[in-house]
Image (tube, grey):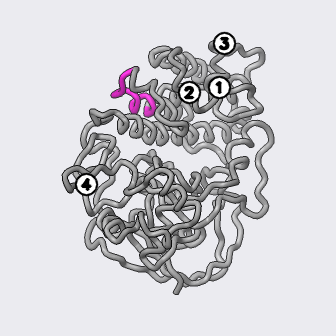
Amino acid sequence: MAPHMIDQDWLTEYAAVRQHTEALAAPLSPEDQTVQTMADVSPTKWHRAHVTWFFETFVLGDHIEGYRPYADGYWTLFNSYYEAKGPRHPRPERGFITRPGAGEVGDYRSDIDKRMLEFLSGLDETAIQALAPLMELGFHHEQQHQELLLMDIKHVMSRNPLRPAAYSSGQHHVHPIAGDTGEDWAIVDGGLVEIGAAGERFCFDNETPRHPVYVPAFRIDRDLVTNRQWLEFMADGGYARHEFWLSDGWARVKAEGWQAPLYWIEEDGQWWQHTLSGTRPLDLDEPVIHVSHYEADAYASWAGARLPTEFEWELAADQGALRNVDDACWQWTSSAYLPYPGFHAAAGAVGEYNGKFMSNQMVLRGGACITPAGHARTTYRNFYPPHSRWAFSGVRLAADV
């Protein structure tokens, strides 16, 4: 995190972030909010409770002497992966938590919000400066879970044979790429460049320290790969030809029977796509989404190209060479999620936020149509295992000059 003050009133920002989470949950029934359809998916009410747990434990619990938790057991149920904060309920079993219900989670949120507002209102200037980095981290942590909430409820609804809509038509929708959707390459000169966050605004610790990287000249597609282009890959046997695939990816294709991106459905010769607003015909000019790193890499091999490194992506984005940078889907890179030179995790439980996941993950850059406004930036390092498909992840091609 960059050590600087939050640039707007805390109480207003806190309320806005918290209210947006509730607005996302409002159209969902208590039953919708309880289901967990795979180990990577968390129930909506768990997300609502976990981000509340974050403020209760890291702010109230750590800064109010003699603080008493809201309810016995909540700190175990809603702890995600913070070993320093005590025991945790197993992630794959979050869907087993029928109690507390969605309404009781709402009561929990309301109580902690009241306590938080009382606590923040009583801080002096010195305390405000000391708490600023943690508070800002809390805001961005909740925004991350707002995106996860949408990813997860989309998966939940997709497993219902009625194919229900979670939200009204047009909400959280990936829009078609305007104009010619063919390849339009930019040439970037490269050289010795500075990569990473400079500290003038909030960033996660994995975006630091800013450091020099030598990037050879490269080409990069200004646009994202579209559904139309992906159908061409499929028609040419993309999911059946091992020569395009990494070994682990090919094993996944065979083991899980991948034949198309996640949420694509073929009926009577027509392709449909399940979205947050229901199932609709596939729009050929939309960016392809819900593909794994393995699929992205295979497509790039088929197309005679490759995926950009995260450093190429950041350089091209900073130079304005890319379209749909952060408003469509996260874009896979060829970079493994590793620490930048000189990276050190923060002391204490907060230091568990990013650093301990720097293994067996690949970096994605950009942002998505479900990313909260103002949350994305060109230095943001998202990361998932290479087989993950339920994230709003897509493809941008690169090539050597």
Question: Which residue was labeled with disc 3?
Answer: 72
Marks 3/1: CA–CA distance: 14 Å
Residue at image coords 61%, 83%: 216
- SS at mark 3? loop
Marks 3/2: CA–CA distance: 17 Å
In this rendering, would 372 be left or right of 247? left
The residue under label 2 is which amino acid type? Arg
Q: Nearer the viewer, mark 3 or mark 2?
A: 2
- SS at mark 1? loop
- Residue 290 can be seen in this image: yes
* Vertical comparison of 281 with 66: above or below: below
Residue at image coords 58%, 20%: 112
In the image shown, does 369 or 241 lie closer to the viewer? 241
Image: magenta residue range: 20-30
Q: Nearer the viewer, mark 3 or mark 4?
A: 4
Does the magenta run of residues contain 400?
no
Image marks 2 and 4: residues in contact by CB distance under 8 Å: no
Question: Which residue was labeled with disc 4?
Answer: 271
Return the x and y of residue 316 as percentages of the image width and height: 51, 73
Q: Which circle's residue, 2 or 1, is located before the other in the chain?
A: 1
Marks 2/1: CA–CA distance: 7 Å
Q: Which circle's residue, 4 or 1, is located before the other in the chain?
A: 1
Image marks 4 and 1: residues in contact by CB distance under 8 Å: no
The residue under label 4 is which amino acid type? Trp
* Among the 4 quarters of the image, the one containing residue 138: top right
